[in-house]
Amino acid sequence: MSDAVADLLLGFDTITADTGLPAIETMLRQLARNLTGADPLRRATIRQMVVERLKALEISAAARLVDAALEPGPTIPTATPTVQLADAEPWPEPVDGAALLTELTAWISSYVWISPVAATAAALWGTATWCVEHVDFAPILAVLSATKRCGKSHLLDLLRGVVRRGYLTSGSGVTTAVVFRLNNTQRPTLLIDEAEKLAGRHADRELIGMLNAGYRRGAQVQRCVERNGDFEVVAFDAFGFRALAAIGRLWDTILDRAITVRLERKPRDVTLRRFSSRVVETEAARLARRLARWAADSRTAVATALADTPRPDWLDDRACDNWAALLAVATVTGSDWPTVTLTAARTLSSAATVDAADDTERLVHDLRRLWDDEKWGAAVKSGDLTAKLNELEGSPWGDYAKGKGLTTHRLAAMCKPLGVGPRQDRDGTQVVRGYWRTDLEPVFRRYPPPEVVQLVQLVQEKPHHDLSVPLVPPVPVQAERAGPPRLMVEATKPGVYRVSGGAEPHVVEIMPGAGARCDCGDHQYRGRQRDCKHIVAVHEHQTPAGQALLDRLGLDETL
């Protein structure tokens, strides 16, 4: 121990109750200077000695005073300034919203290989960010692709320049703390590239939870913050617009709150504008100024339009919330944009329905499909069911348990929230422990497959007098089990088909729950498993949606 440090330690013995804090501060500062360059062990030893001497003199907060003197304070890198975001300066003249949206859509399409409805959605979403204070829901824009080099990063770069207070980051650099603190002070439009960390079993659940909550106005996250030596619970504002770009898919709950845009790699024979950062920034700045002016003039109208935005039956409640802000923007913009927006909503929502389904809903759809394909009848054993599920191509069950597949116990656990499970009962002459069709039928009705939902919507939208329009297009089909003749199948009305191409035409009637009937009479002795060739042709002709609708939802002439 140096003489200077030893002298300072002796000096602490001279402190009395009358010694003021300024004198103690001076001694501590001198001690800290003398310990410059000392190793951690020496610093810790001296600290403990000083703390004990101050406590013996009944100096309050002794440890805190010594730590403030000896421990180095936080170092703030001067090369990374505090994030400061500002709105673009509004355009000096009023802006035509319809023309601006058309130009913005074309600008996005000139740089990125993207479908027209996806470009429409991206342009509307970017415009809606300028009305964040006046909307109730801020949908996530999910930009997904099957592989790299599909234009996801380019699209986020384009949006960064035109959205309100755009802030681009990556999935590797964003944390929950960054999001809620930045959002609380700046309210940015956060664009997260390489967001694959928000998918899979190792996903950042805390960040996912905050993004899920943050799409609704009034959302907050609570954190314990130290103030004056004590911890207080502080609520941070979490509401705001976010865009996420990733390869593959994101967490199911994220996609449920998202407008999903899928990108594909540009064909070789397609030419797009070459992406130049300087050119893009210049063009984006001009668009942003016009968007700022349009928003300044139209925010109140957008808030009013939210109360009257359409909530079509073909969108579920969550999807209606997701599209509400975009539909309000389209309503205020006028021209044909409300119709264009509804078309984009129908197209993108229909395409995302299957992808957004969680595993439980996917399980219901697969159970229904397997039951009909395998013709299991009243019941199926648990082991047979899991074996078929694991073999099902395109479904995730074979990947469960690190590739070992779905087990009977896991299947029972997944079915339990649905109110069904394996049970033992008699099926004819044998006792079966497994799953029963009668137990699953209510579940099948509650969770119809997407293609059935779309077909029901199509039938409901048709006027009653127009039900003669075929549910499936009349195309020639080969009845594989009926021999070589090619038969033409045409739906004359729901459930009734005209089969021609043989010696004479015949009428086939599909009766939900009672099989099929043909006027040729051959079906009467062959039964369901060996239908006549006309019934076979109809079954081969029907799409999965039509077959599901007829067999399970009881579609008949009363629709």
Image (cartoon, rainbow, N blue to C red):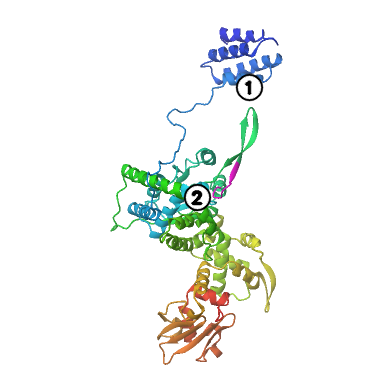
| Among the two numbered marks 1 and 2 on one chain, the one whose residue lies closer to the N terminus | 1
* 510 or 5, nearer to the observer: 510
Residue 136 covered by magenta stretch: no
Does dot 1 land on a helix, a strand or a loop?
helix
Question: Which residue range is magenta in the image?
Answer: 214-221
Would you say residue 531 is visible in this rendering?
no
Q: Position of residue 262 (x, y in %)?
A: 42, 57
What residue lies at 55% left-to-right and 74% top-to-bottom? 372
**Mark toward the viewer: 1 or 2:** 2
- Element marked by disc 2: helix
- Determine which residue is flagged by label 2: 300
Q: Nearer the viewer, residue 38 or 197?
A: 197
* Image x and y of residue 401, in percent: 56, 55
Residue 89 placement (x, y as % from top left): 40, 41
Residue 15 sits in quarter: top right
Figure label count: 2
Q: Residue at x 53, y 16 (%)?
A: 38
- The residue identified by callout 1 is 64
